[in-house]
Each structure stands twice: as C-alpha cells, then as structure tokens.
C-alpha cells in the first residue's frame, strides 16, 4: 500500500515541496510557449525548433492549459483547498504520461544516435579507427540517454507522489486549517487561556 510522504527531499515539508514543483512546472510551461512563439512567429530557432509545426502548436496549447491550472493549484496550496491541488495532480499525471511517451519514442523507437548525425558525419568518411570511434560514441550516447530517461521518469513519478501526498494530507486535515481558525473570537479565547492568574480566586 502506498502511503503519503511526510517530508520532501529528506528535509522540507510537503507543502514546500509542492510549491517548488509548481514553480518549476510553471517555468517549463512558459518556456515551451516562448520557444514556440520564437520558432513560429519570430523565426528564431530555440529548444523546440526541431519539432514539426503541428507538434509545437499542440504542446503549446497543452502548456497554455497548464499555466492557469498551476496558478489555481498555487491558490489551493495557500488556502489548503483540496480540489485545486487535485486538479493539478491530474494535469501533472497527464503531463508525465506525455513526457514518458515522448522519451520512449526518442530512445526506443528512434535511434538516439540519429541526433549525432551532424557530429559523426565526418567520421563516416574516415578510416576504420574513425568508424570505431563512431561506434564507441554512439554506444556511449545510448547508455547516457537511457540513464537520463530513467532518472527523469523517477523524478516525475516522485513529483506525482509528493502532490498526491499533499492532497491526502489536506483531505485528512493534517495540512488543512485548524478548527481554531473557524472560531470568530479566537484571539480573545487564546488571550484568556494564556492570561496568568493574579490570585488564588482569579477567574
């Protein structure tokens, strides 16, 4: 059985961890939108310039949906609203699914060595030692690609676990507002409890 986390990264609280995840995801969404605008509107190649125009527009639309979802989740994090955070949890899970499908495609379906075609083009025209060097670089690049994909998948799944943990904590009341916050005269009650008695018959 999966249990909610009690802390984030062995030191921070779960709400702080969710806040870090939200900020990082917001930066990523804004970066993809800016990259698509730079490639398609201003014709300045950026990170997603190798993607097709349809793929850039599709992922830009997905990122634009994510930006208000993240802001809603931030408000839910501040006010401890479970519905807002759980809505972001669904969006995050779908984002991880899309990223995993893309990583599987570029590492298993398409040969990772294809991205080194420009670098290795001169080696293909060389001698046998050059071809051996090409094979070594290609094998090394494949291993690094597989390790990087595995690490990214673990990080993304951990982020889902952290957000889900906060949803469960808010649902059970661990990170939600205390009952004392609902008292209209909370300050007066607290002052009365904390007041030091002045004598044996003081009320």
Image (spheres, rainbow, N blue to C red):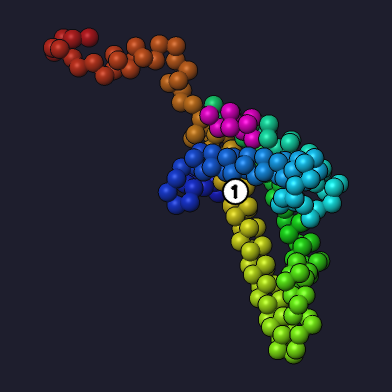
- Which one is in front, 61 or 132? 132
71 in the magenta segment: yes
Q: Quadrant of the C terminus?
A: top left
Q: Which residues are magenta?
A: 70-78
Q: Residue furthest bottom?
A: 128
Which one is nearer the viewer's eye here, 111 or 94? 111
Q: Please give the residue where the numbered disc 1 appears in the rendered image.
A: 159
The answer to which of 25 and 5 lies nearer the viewer is 25
Task: Please tell me whether mark 1 sits on a helix, a strand or a loop.
Answer: helix
Residue under the image location 81 percent in, 66 percent down: 109
Residue 188 x/y as whole percent: 34, 11
Horizontal side, residue 172 vs residue 94: left or right: left
Magenta-span inclusion, residue 36: no
Residue occupying image coordinates x 30% and y 15%: 191
Q: Main secondary structure of the magenta part?
A: helix
Q: Is residue 141 visible?
A: yes
Q: Is residue 179 above or below residue 71?
A: above
Whether residue 94 is visible here, answered yes or no, is no
- Tell me where residue 70 sits by quadrant: top right
Q: Nearer the viewer, residue 25 or 85?
A: 25
């Amino acid at each position: 059985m999966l249990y909610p986390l009690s802390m984030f990264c062995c030191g921070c609280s779960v709400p702080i961890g969710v806040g870090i995840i939200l900020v990082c995801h917001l930066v990523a969404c804004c970066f993809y939108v800016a990259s698509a605008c730079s490639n398609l509107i201003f014709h300045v190649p950026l990170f997603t310039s190798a993607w097709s125009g349809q793929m850039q527009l599709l992922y830009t639309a997905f990122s634009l949906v994510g930006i208000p979802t993240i802001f809603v989740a931030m408000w839910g994090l501040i006010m401890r609203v479970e519905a807002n955070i759980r809505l972001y949890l669904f969006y995050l899970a779908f984002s991880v699914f899309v990223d995993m499908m893309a990583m599987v495609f570029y590492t298993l379906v398409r040969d990772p060595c294809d991205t080194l075609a420009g670098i290795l083009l001169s080696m293909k025209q060389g001698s046998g030692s050059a071809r051996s060097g090409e094979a070594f670089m290609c094998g090394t690049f494949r291993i690094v690609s597989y390790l990087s994909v595995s690490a990214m998948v673990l990080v993304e799944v951990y982020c889902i676990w952290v957000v889900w943990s906060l949803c469960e904590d808010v649902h059970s009341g661990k990170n939600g507002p205390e009952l004392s916050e609902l008292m209209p005269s909370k300050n007066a009650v607290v002052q009365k409890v904390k007041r030091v008695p002045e004598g044996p018959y003081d009320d």
